[in-house]
Image (tube, grey):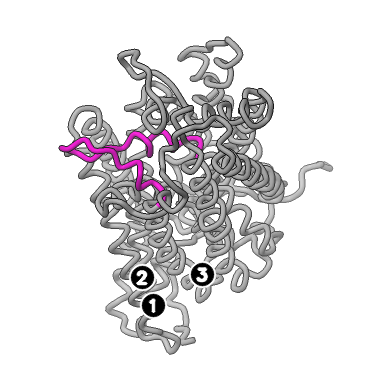
Amino acid sequence: MATDTPPPTAGMKKTLGLTGVTVNAMALIAPGAFLWITYQVQAAQTLPGSGASTALDMFPGIVFALVLAFFTAFSYSELARIYPEAGTGSCYYFAERSFLDKLNAAHHRWARPAKLATGWAAHLFYWVYPGVMVSFMAILVSYLLQQFGLNIGMIGQLVVAGVFSILVGFIAIRGVTGSTTTSLVINVIQLVTLVGFSAVAVAYRMLNPDHATFAFASAPAVVLPKDLFSVFSQATIAILILVGFESATAFGAEAKNAKRDVPRAVILALVIQGLFAYLIEYFAANDALSDKLVGTDAAGKAISGMTAAAASSAPIGDLIKQIGDTMLGGLGFPLMVVVAVTVALAILGTTLSAMNTGVRITYAMAQDEEMPGLLGLLHGRFATPHIAVVVLVIVSGLIGMIGTLSVVTLTGITLASNFGTFVLYALTCLIAVNAFLGRADFRFVKHAVVPILGFLANMVMLITIFALGFMGGGDSQTESFMALGFAGVWLVASVAYVALRRRPPARAVPERTTA
């Protein structure tokens, strides 16, 4: 009988050039979304014990975190260069191959533990992260509707979370070409909006039409560090807004020239979104912050400047309204709405990129019989791991709903994702060292010093995040325990699956590559 459905494809389609791979990674970093989402947390951060604010070291903290991110990005880039056949496996494949590639057979027994540990961390990151972004979207939609006098309440936020998760899944199932087009459009809109906002903010500081007293005495004061421990503390937040550059390595199966384009895309994504967009927008926002940004604290007392930013649920939205009313003839509110819409688009792009990356690593593990086989099935028409997408849509919706319940639950799931991120990054840096040791192209600085610095930096960030949580007590401690609970449950489930099923056939040891 004739049918309109094409036969199942043998594999994913190679449709992505350098631009395609890069914009998919850029979408996951999404500076437009995170400036709006995280500025309040950064403005409100204080040191445990003393309670002193770290907000004046926000920009130096981002610079420090960016340096650490480049250490990790370089390790991913170098691994993608020597293992272009990794396909969708990314770090999971790198971990296994780095041991199987050794001439000494004694190393081969570590291949499976390494890939399982890396796969567990990758899934904790990529399968929780989309749910976090679903929560942020629900909260943003609620905030926007409140500006028009509409309060959707908790039930409304739960509905938004579910609908948004389904929407992202629908786009993801239809293939990477549609996802790439969506991500490209979103990235262009986002970067144009950020440049426009930054220009207006800097002009406001230079002209000072309100005769304001600014949070920072001068432009150099924005960028110069004030206290080293405050810089480190701010970096624990800033590093979270920079993750995602590595997602380029999960698109190797769909890259036309993976060996050339994937390594470049890893670095390019971080350069464009981190070095360019983040530094410009955070400088501009801090440079323009003044006593004209007002609000009230929990006791109803009038506050202004950085204190008001710390107390607001959307300080960037408030800042845009304040500057727009002064600089653009009372157009602050419509300008804020326009920017908020671009933030919503950026969150869409981030969630889509995270979901695409997550299901591709899942697909690789399922093909390797380390996860249920259903998750390794490809859609007959779109050649995407559609069953994995459907499962991740459900998981993301549920996690997103949990995140909307309170600030504590939102922070808890965010920390759980971050736990997976830093463990994954630290492991990948060690894998880079292992992969290059004994190769003819081994270079001490590139393949030992840089990855080891990346490993240490990621471990310091991981320890610092949870140390700050436990030392802070109260809600901070609850959030840390919630994150560790998520990680523990995922670990137990992963170990149980591996233990209860038969060991997959040993993969053939590939011929060792020396250059």
Q: Which residues are magenta?
A: 34-59
- Residue 300, compared with residue 281, is above or below; it is above
Asked whether residue 386 is in view, the answer is: no
Residue at the (38%, 39%) spot, across then down: 42
Label 2 residue SS: helix
According to the picture, the residue beneath numbered tag 3 turns out to be 80
Q: Which residue is mark 1?
A: 447
Extreme residue in the bottom direction? 440
Q: In the image as oriented, which residue stretches furthest toward the right?
A: 2
Q: Taking 448 as reference, is 306 above or below it?
A: above
Q: Indicate the position of residue 109 as horizontal and vertical percent values.
A: 29, 71
Mark 2 lies on residue: 451
The mark closer to the camera, 2 or 3, is 2
In this view, the residue in front, 379 or 502, is 379
Residue 188 inside the magenta-drawn segment: no
Q: Residue 45 vs residue 80: left or right?
A: left
Q: Is residue 304 visible?
A: yes
Mark 2 vs mark 3, CA separation in Å: 14 Å
